[in-house]
Amino acid sequence: MNVHDPAEEIVALRAEVVQLRLLANNVPVAIAYFEARGYTCRFANLGYASMFGRDEQSVIGLTFAQIIGDEAARQIQPKVDTILREHRSASYERQLPAADGGTRWIEVSLLPHLDATGTAVGAFVLIADITHHRRAELALRESEERLAKFMHASAEGIVFHRGGIVTDANPPALALLGRTLPEVLGQPALDFVAPDQRERVGAVMAAGSEITYETAVQHRDCTRLPVEFIVRTMEHHGERLRMTIVRDLRDRMADQARIHHLAHHDALTGLPNRGAFIDRLEGLLPYARARGATLALLFIDLDHFKRVNDSLGHLAGDALLQTVAHRITSALRVGDLVARFGGDEFVVLLSGDQPAAAVREVAHKLLAVIGAPVEVEGASISVTPSIGISMFPQDGQTPDALIKHADTAMYHAKSRGRADCRFFEPVMAEAAYADLAMESRLAQAIRDREFVLHYQPQLSLHDGALVGCEALIRWAHPERGLILPDAFIPLAESRRLMLPIGDWVLREAVAQARRWHLAGLASVPIAVNLSTTQFQSVGFVDAVQRLLGEQGVEGRLLEIELTERMLMDELASVRDSLERLRALGVRIAVDDFGTGYTSLGHLKSLPVDRLKIDRSFIRDLPGDTGSAAIAGAVIQMAHGLGMRTLAEGVETAAQRDWVAARGCDELQGNLEAEPMPAAAFEDWLRARQSRQN
Ligand code: C2E
Ligand code: MG
Ligand code: MG
């Protein structure tokens, strides 16, 4: 400063002081100067003064103890003494109560002021507020501690890596890998990923993406474990760290597999269900089409399965279904597909290009293995299947069409006496359609009473006397004329329409017997054919008893005809029903005898009055030796058991003479009379009576 006027000099100095103060007050540090002697403050900037609740003027001349407080001064005094004595600077950190009630952290630097002689005459104090810095540090430390705690508390595996090199891993992650911490630290993270996944995981790592994805790790023993990776990037000490949460998916996969299995499989047999089967078939059809291969679809339905359920209970039914499922699977080749469609329906898809003959062979094998007796709850039962077969491509192009046509063919097998297999034929589809139309018409026919009974006489072969007549139902269709029972009874039977029809027949026959008896025309039993469902229906015997009572008709004027099949189930309850009917005076005949499998020994224990030898054996008499042998044996054995025999469908004198010569008791057939409406039957009776008189 080169100014000589003292006044100017003062002005200039003042300006300088103002500038310095401006500077001092605007630096982000608190500054003060203390004299060594007396430790009094000679200078303080605004930052310093306000830090201790003062202003720049009022702090001047105060001792540092007065400014910072005695307690703080006592602690700091030694530091001050040291710097003054040793002529070197020192710094320390301490906490101050902050205006907001919290704590501020300050970093204090003390610098000695040496005069020209090297004597320490004062000390500069520089204070920086490091609260912010300290808080950040603390937060980092806390978060690291938290992370460490979290890592160890987590049940899920956590791995940290930096630039692909593992820096940390928690116990669950190590357990999953079958490794110890030292074995993984410093190793490439990808080494622990399943080999087939390394490329993918490497790509995620390279991209630094924060994603969640399913992949697999490799255990020390080289097993591949499905896991989920949840990847995050973290800043740590200024470095980018990657944290991967490794979630063990084995349980979840197992659950999913179970759910998948449950959704696609039948819980009882473990076989694929309908949906799963259709999915598989849908997938196979394009290949078969491309290769020009044929496929065979077998629709298997158990005959009379409901009876097992009804009579032995659902547990027995379930056990039977499981056995059947097992038998089907065992009888087929590995590549064949077996499914259960529900209830007693199973479907098989034969793999490979099999000609029809081979398919038929498989079907017959299935018929045999499924039909073999099963031990269920101590009882030996056998349930035969009926099988329908459709072939790809000729019988259908879609799973739906193939299944529907196999189902149709199965129905035909059933209507053909069951325990059989049938290939689908296009006419069946028409028949199925006709059935459908017929079904709804049949329900209407029941409401509108469109049925009539025809009566066919039964005569003694010993003396030609009328011994009875059989009531045979006809459907007097308004447009189609008289429809014979074979054309609608199987349908009614399968669609549960047989009960109301059977009731009507019984009622009508009993009413007719009453009229003829009262008119003195005939006092012989009218035979009524029973359907399976009817005979098995609850309270059937009671209903018969009630009916006879209501009409005032003696039981001896009624006969019921049962087929062999009906007698084969549950002997005890069948015998009970028959005995109760017998007690009412009702007669019992076994119809179509010889076509079933009933042994005569089995019949012996049942109250049966007569056997009706099926007309298929009579038809070929006397020429056919097989028929002759059977018919002859039946007549002979029936007599041995005290039962009468009746020859059905006798059309010729030769047939009549043949059975008569073998000791057959009675006959029924067109030779004597065809089935006739009631009025015609009455005429026939009268004509006969007048002939005899
Ligand atoms: P089914 O009980 O064996 O009845 C005898 C069948 O043989 C009758 O056929 C009868 O018309 C026929 N027939 C009698 N004599 C001769 C003959 O000399 N030659 C030939 N070729 N056939 C003869 P239909 O009336 O067609 O009845 C067929 C079957 O329908 C019956 O066989 C029976 O199983 C069933 N059915 C008839 N009416 C009823 C009924 O009311 N309820 C039930 N559930 N089934 C019935
Ligand atoms: Mg009959
Ligand atoms: Mg018959």
Image (tube, rainbow, N blue to C red):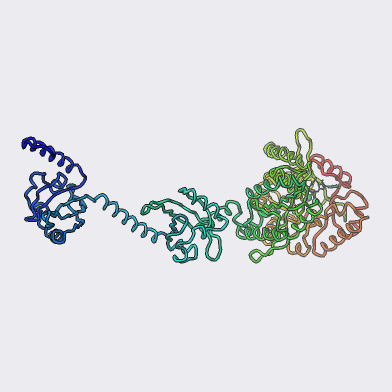
In percent of width and height, residue 360 lies at 79, 53
Quick one: 286 or 38, which is closer to the camera?
38
Residue 645 lies in quadrant: bottom right
Residue furthest to the top in view is 479
Quick one: 543 or 510, which is closer to the camera?
543
Side of 45 relative to 346 (left or right): left
> Which residue: 51% across, 60% down?
192
> Which residue: 7% across, 35% down?
5
Side of 24 relative to 468 (left or right): left
> Which residue: 42% across, 61% down?
170
Question: How many numbered discs sit on the rendered protein?
Answer: 0
**Above or below, comparing residue 548 to residue 480 in the picture:** below
**Above or below, comparing residue 403 to residue 179 in the picture:** above
In percent of width and height, residue 201 lies at 52, 53
Residue 490 can be seen in this image: no
Residue 457 can be seen in this image: yes
In percent of width and height, residue 657 lies at 92, 54
Side of 417 relative to 153 (left or right): right
Q: Quadrant of the N terminus?
A: top left
In percent of width and height, residue 583 lies at 69, 58
**Above or below, comparing residue 399 to residue 589 in the picture:** above
Residue 598 lies in quadrant: bottom right
Quick one: 607 or 263, which is closer to the camera?
263
Side of 550 relative to 117 (left or right): right
> Which residue: 74% across, 41% down?
432
